[in-house]
Amino acid sequence: MTDLTQQRGLFEGTFPKPVTVDFTARRQSSDGGVVLLRQIDARTGLTASLASSLDERRSTARVQHDLELLVRQRVLSIALGYADCNDAARIGDDPALTLACGRAPDASGSLASQPTLSRFERGRAGRELVAMSRALERNVMDRLARSARRARRVTIDLDSTVDPTHGTQQHSLFNGYCGTWCYLPLLGFLSIDDEPEQYLFHARLRPGTSRDGRGVRSLLARVIPDLKRRFRRAEVLVRVGEGFCGPELLAMLDELGARYVAGIAKNPKLEALAGKHMHAARALTSRFGPSTQLFGDCEHATKSWKRSRRVVFKAEVVSLEERTPRDNLRLVVTNLRQSPEALWALYARRGDSENRIKELKCDLEIDRTSSSSFLANQLRVLLTSAAFVLVQALRDTLRETEFARARVSTPRLKLLKVAATVKSTWRRIVISLPETYAWAAAWRTAALAAGAAAC
């Protein structure tokens, strides 16, 4: 069988001289920047805390790759764009990734193979994954508490998304609203004060017919007291869409002393209370043309609520070219006392979590839940979430640069996917990046912020 890596390519007539290309350079990596993520991982203790939640049930005499190495290999590989266990055959000898996982870079075949990784994913019990999820939550909250000690508000944004399935996966069910067989993951994000970044801290895979609110109350009952202990000067705000809001959730949030802004569905009574604003919005739109928004509030109570609550509404008439103007009445229930317009602007910022979900899906492939085992798919979701947490921590080291708000694919391409030569001597390991590397300044900034010593 021909070894394709030993073949050469010859280009003639295009360049000043004939150009020969081969694949014989030794101890070189196309992912030299992965040591940045490993340094951040070491400072936060993320993969170590996730691995400590798992039980080692293998024979210790036969184990070549401990659980911490397996977790770290999968998390770093996903961050680099290798979402499948099958990719281990392509990158198993990469010296930079080998070094980042804790092995000598000049050791051949030192990373786990695809069969080992697949057995690892399918061998986890439900209680281990619960413990792993808790470890992820604590790690993110601890890191934010250290970096934002004077925070005035910590905001929890919860959202669900569709994860289409294409096989015989456990708990893959047909969702009529989404129109497909799927899972319905629940994702939770934290943000500090008015900062735009939303930090992923919770990811739970759920069956395809789950309601949006499934698992939300137990999550908030656990997380809100934890946040109050970590951020003693800050109030906790919960922002959720109308699919999550119910009388039990509102009562629990009142009992926990949390602030909330929650979308609620329309009903005839609320439509009547907002009627004057809707009439005015229609009149303005018919006279001046463009879409019109008016804001107002009222006190409202239902049979399922123990008391009346403040409801803020946006009376909007949407006017598009060659279409009949249509009403768009939106409502939220809240215990905040801001003006209706300011409060609606606060609620609207939860929509940015859609961009975080897009990053998780398009850049890290969190929806690659192709295993027939539901628990194995949940583990993949957690490992992908951990990779995203590391990339968010990397972006935090570059707040004053172009990478501060860049999506995952940008720092991966420019900071992690860097050609490097890895040399190991008796005294040290030297990683040499290209002299003409275009983003060397940003790389140095991230390295120093992550704890590297200037030399």
Image (spheres, grey):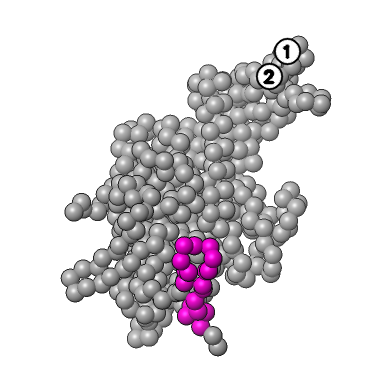
- As drawn, 286 above or below 219: above
- Relative to 3, say whether 266 is above or below: above
Q: Residue at x 34, y 58 (%)?
A: 434
**Which is more toward the observer, 337 or 351?**
351
- Crowding at dot 1, Cα within 10 Å, few <14 / some 14-19 / many 20+, comes out as few
As for residue 80 lying within the magenta part, the answer is no
User: According to the image, label 1 marks what residue?
Assistant: 288
Q: Position of residue 417 (x, y in %)?
A: 43, 59
Q: Nearer the viewer, mark 2 or mark 1?
A: 1
Q: Quadrant of the C terminus?
A: bottom left
Residue 432 shows in the view: yes
| Discs 2, 1 touching: Cβ within 8 Å | yes
Q: Position of residue 190 (x, y in %)?
A: 45, 42
Residue placed under numbered mark 2 in the picture: 292
The amino acid type, in three-letter code, at marker 2 is Thr
Q: Examine the image and state in which quarter residue 233 appears.
A: top left
> Would residue 115 be seen by someone viewing this image from the given angle?
no
